[in-house]
Amino acid sequence: MKRAVVLAHFDRDGVVDPCVVAAVQAYRPLADTLLLVSVSAGKLPRALDGVVDGFLPRDNVGYDFGSWQAGVRWLGDPQRYDEILFVNDSVYGPLFDLRPALEDPRGRAFDLWGMVMSAEREPHVQSWCFAMRRPILESPAFTAFWESVAPQPTKEDVVNRYEVGMSQFFKAAGFQAGAVIDSRDEPPPTIREMLHAAAGLGPLGLLRHIRQLRRRGPPYNPSELLWRRLWQAGVPFLKAGIFSRNQYAIDPRQVLADLGSLAPAWGDLVMRHQARRATGN
């Protein structure tokens, strides 16, 4: 399979963090063409010299879909590829080999596919990692969708119009959309998972966690709530939002402990990235 990978990068401090460097290096063996599109960094870090096929800095407009749109234009004829994989740095990883997930039978049946199918709002492929395969790449719908992408007033508008809207657009055009993990098929968190997620927070922390589960769902976002299920299913990513908005009141120390056991090098990278974000240095 001939594959292009387009990575959309944003960093509030204008740097390419070592986490992103590690991600790019992990994508390299999987990509015939690897493009990094950044709205933050003006130049490629030395660690990525010779690793990417292209580096495209651009103005910070349009969020990730604006970067992916620019990447599609940079790639040229989409029919040169069997698949274009679109990713961003709102996740850490790949934490381990991504190739099995790319070849997973649960995703192979779909023209538009990703790691997670969300049940929130309308069913849709979550946009932090998704791909379009040859049936779409050969269709006028591919160009029509990417030409329709335009700057939106808020991130919420982008999510509604493009993340959620993308799945609806291609379904209406006759294509199949799905994912390795379909949250509609996922059972709710078990008692053991809830205890684990709030392991170091004590009884009050566990109560907050349970209250957040009741307040926010179902449907739940497995990318942030069920991180261990993702890994067990072969999805090698961790949402950075667990450490920022933390919408399910999870114990971040437990997440880091699990990550350290799974992928020690990534555990160190994530801790350093979170420390930089906390201090602004």
Image (cartoon, rainbow, N blue to C red):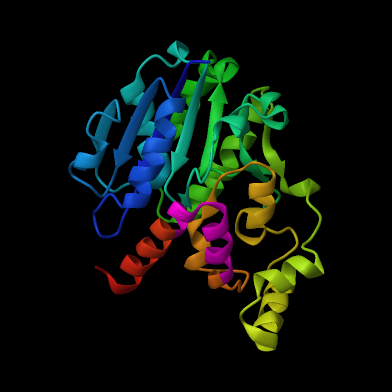
Q: Viewer-proximal residue, 5 or 157?
A: 5
Q: Residue at x 49, y 43 (%)?
A: 94
Horizontal side of residue 73 vs 143, given as left or right: left
Horizontal side of residue 110 vs 142, given as left or right: right
Q: Is residue 195 above or below residue 11?
A: below
| Percent of width and height locating residue 189 | 77, 63
Q: Where's the C terminus, which quadrant?
A: bottom left
Q: Is residue 19 above or below residue 276?
A: above
Q: To which quarter of the image does residue 6 belong?
A: top left
- The answer, for residue 44, to whether it is visible in the render is no
Q: Residue at x 68, y 22 (%)?
A: 174
Q: Is residue 146 magenta?
A: no
In the picture as drawn, the residue positioned furthest to the bottom comes out as: 204
Secondary structure mostly seen in magenta is: helix
Q: Which residues are magenta?
A: 254-267
Horizontal side of residue 145 vs 13, given as left or right: right
Q: Is residue 264 magenta?
A: yes
| Percent of width and height locating residue 10 | 33, 50
Q: Viewer-proximal residue, 26 or 151?
A: 26
Q: To which quarter of the image does residue 197 belong?
A: bottom right
Q: Residue at x 50, y 61 (%)?
A: 241
Q: How many marks?
A: 0
